[in-house]
Amino acid sequence: MIAKRTYIRYSIALFVFFNILPVSLQHAAASTSTVGGAVVHKHRHTAEYRIGKNNEGRLRTRLHYDYGFTDFYAGRITVSMDRRKGGNLEAEAVGFDNRFHLLKNADHGFDLSARIALNLRDGNKKPDRLSFRLDERFRPGTWEIRLNQIFTREIGQEQRHGIAFEFRSQITHGIGTGGMRIGLESFNNFGKLNRSSNWSDQEHTAGVLIKNGFGDGYFFDLGTRTSLSRAAPDHSLRFSIGRNW
């Protein structure tokens, strides 16, 4: 009963928070990115749908399908869509991810994976992108810490030389016994490593999130971030829902 009351209390508080906060902001931008996990499960299917929208009417969506071929390797396909204000919903990109679970918590006290991804962009949204990333997960007690280091290079038509670097972090704490977690996260895009730029010219954001698993393998993730630097969006909101089976 206590866990149920806690769940309801946090749900109401976060519902009010997410509905009131955007009103006070003059500009808003949405992102479908999250701080990724490092774990691979053999024969696990995961389907996920993400959506974000800003106050200028731009809508972005992403559909994921992930499958663990072994306890070491999982593959993922993503389809991204984009709609600007006054326009139609258009295909933006198709992505192919390969994730390798290198170190496991049971043996090393934390999880580490490496991911290689190819993002093929549609039409005039070139260039394509190739990325390499490391994902770590630490689970001290009821806490969970996720870290991502992402290196991206543009390839194909209209590519700009240089490798971009992004660092993502997330810390969450379990609430009750139902699988709910709340926490903080940050996204830090430092831009091209071969170019000198100061903090204000880079994209740095931070915010809060809530996520929960429920029912027969279903889960959701709801988050909001605000800018920490001039070049970053003033505000972004995201929502995703999915299922594991």
Image: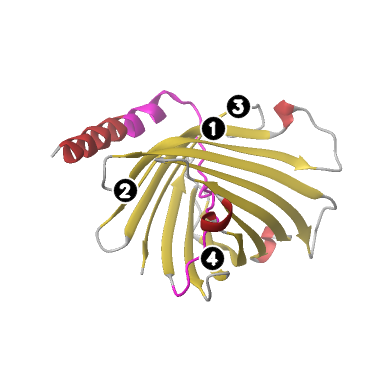
Question: Is residue 31 a member of the stretch shown in magenta?
Answer: yes
Question: Badges 2 and 3: C-beta atoms under 8 Å apart?
Answer: no
Report, in whole angstroms, how far the alpha carbon at label 1 lies from the one at label 2: 23 Å
Spatial separation of the CA atoms under disc 3 and disc 1: 7 Å
Q: How far is disc 2 from disc 4 in space, using C-alphas? A: 26 Å
Question: Is residue 72 depicted above or below 30 in this figure?
Answer: below
Q: Given the image, on which type of amino acid does mark 4 rest? A: Thr
The mark that comes first in sequence, 1 or 2, is 2
Say which amino acid is labelled 2: Gly
In the picture as drawn, the residue positioned furthest to the top comes out as 24
The CA span between labels 1 and 4 is: 25 Å
Q: In which quarter of the image is the N terminus?
A: top left
- Which region shows up in magenta? 17-43
Q: Earlier in the sequence, mark 2 or mark 4?
A: 4
Q: Which residue is drawn at 48% across and 64% down?
A: 64
Mark 3 belongs to which amino acid? Leu
The residue pinned by badge 3 equals 228
The picture places residue 62, in percent across and down from the top left corner, at: 49, 59
Q: Mark 2 points at which residue?
A: 179
Residue matched to label 1? 206
Q: Is residue 156 magenta?
A: no
Label 1 packing within 10 angstroms: few (<14), some (14-19), many (20+): some
